[in-house]
Image (cartoon, helix red, strand yellow):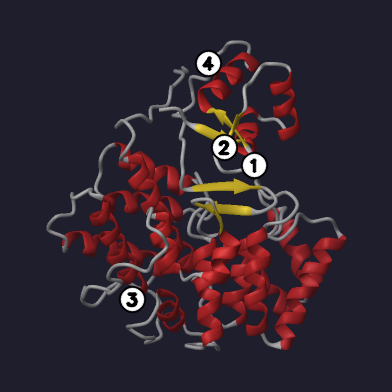
Amino acid sequence: MERMLPSEEAARRLGVKVSTLYAYVSRGLLASHPEPGARRSLFDLADIERLAVRQRGGRQVESRLATITTGVTQLRQDDGPFYRGRRATELAAEMTFEEVAALLWEGDGGDEGDWEAPDLGVCPLGQASDRMRWALVMCAAGDPLRADARPASVARAARRVIAAVTATVGSAPGVASGTIAQRLAGRLGGASQGSSLSAAAVDAALILLADHELSTSTVAVRIAASTRADIYDALLAGLATMAGPLHGGASQQAYELLVTVERDGAARALNDVLRVQHHLPGFGHVIYRERDPRFHALWELAAPLLSEERRDLFLQVMELAKVHNVPAPNCDLALAALSWGTDMPPDAGRTIFTIARIAGWTAHYQEELLERPLRFRARAVYSV
């Protein structure tokens, strides 16, 4: 079956602008195909790959793991992620996290299924990241048919894991029912514990962070799926990769920056961080060079939750960064503002990010099961 790419994705694979892509069409190097029922062009993946090889002088890239074609998420530089063809920033304003998870899992966006947490007993661990891994392992141990890879069974397991992890994190008693966002906002506590505004902001954060195409943790999940690991073990691979400070810990670094700003003032705090780290946590993104649309969508919901003093401090940081041409803020900064501004724990952003991403990982796991197994194999170059 032919696999077709929209123009933005085809251009990205070739490393050119969309205008250059259409120049290739006019020169006869590529053929464009109209999308049925839509006013845009599609390109055959095989044609794009052949042209990419020609651009490399006929050399195949042996170190590439695999060509991963996905229908889960598309990243657009100006508009952010699209889940199953729908803009994530719009979904964050219209749907709940549960509905978006169902959409990612190839449902119609309806809130189907049981989101109740199983009784796992008392967790003996203290750190949130350890508690999440413990909850996942306990869910797996309690599932007698954990190897059932049918889509409905995988989705049921994912709902169970998300609910269990949510019930395990945080120190506040919270609530045992309601949406995942309501339970999580209650568990993480803070000045706005249990408020509808706080739950709405957490819900938006969960949706905006649910997936981001082929991030490192998502690739880890897909690699596990390619070996036909069950959903629990595949999610554990994602959690292990998420634990790295350069991935899941980005919002916590931004949180610590805001704490320092509150203590020392914006100018001194930013200067000290730049002296040590040479960049500002929460600013800049490899995909969104001009603006991260997820930042603006989340900040609009987070801003009313901050005290006037903290909101002013945050805006000082934004203005100082802008004056000195620091790259635009990203979603990690907005997530840090939400957790810092409502007195959530420093690792609350990491917790929200991780729970959100379980939804995306599950979608990629389901998709990878449709591919040939064991397709990820890097080529090593032996060196003495």
Q: Is residue 343 above or below residue 355?
A: below
Give how far across and how far down residue 289 sits, in percent: 72, 49
Mark in front: 4 vs 2: 2
Give the residue type that dot 1 points to: Arg
- Residue of label 3: 167
Crowding near the residue tagged with mark 3, few <14, some 14–19, many ≥20 C-alpha atoms within 10 Å: many
Lower sequence index among marks 4 and 2: 2
Q: Nearer the viewer, residue 74 or 221?
A: 74
Q: Please provide percent x and percent y for residue 343.
A: 56, 83
Callout 2 secondary element = loop
Residues under numbered marks 2 and 1 in contact, where contact means CB atoms less than 8 Å apart: yes
Q: Does 12 sit above or below residue 124?
A: above
Q: Count the labels in the image.
A: 4
Dot label at residue 60: 4
For numbered disc 4, what is the local secondary structure?
A: loop
| Image: 138 above or below 365 | below
Determine the residue located farthest toward the top in the rendered image. Answer: 58
Q: CA distance from mark 1 to mark 3?
A: 46 Å
- Residue holding disc 1: 39
Q: Which residue is mark 2?
A: 35
Q: Identify the image quadrant of residue 163.
A: bottom left
* Residue type of the residue flagged with mark 3: Ala
Looking at the image, residue 9 sits to the left or right of residue 25; the answer is left
User: From what the image shows, is residue 13 above or below residue 293?
Assistant: above
Q: Quadrant of residue 265?
A: bottom right
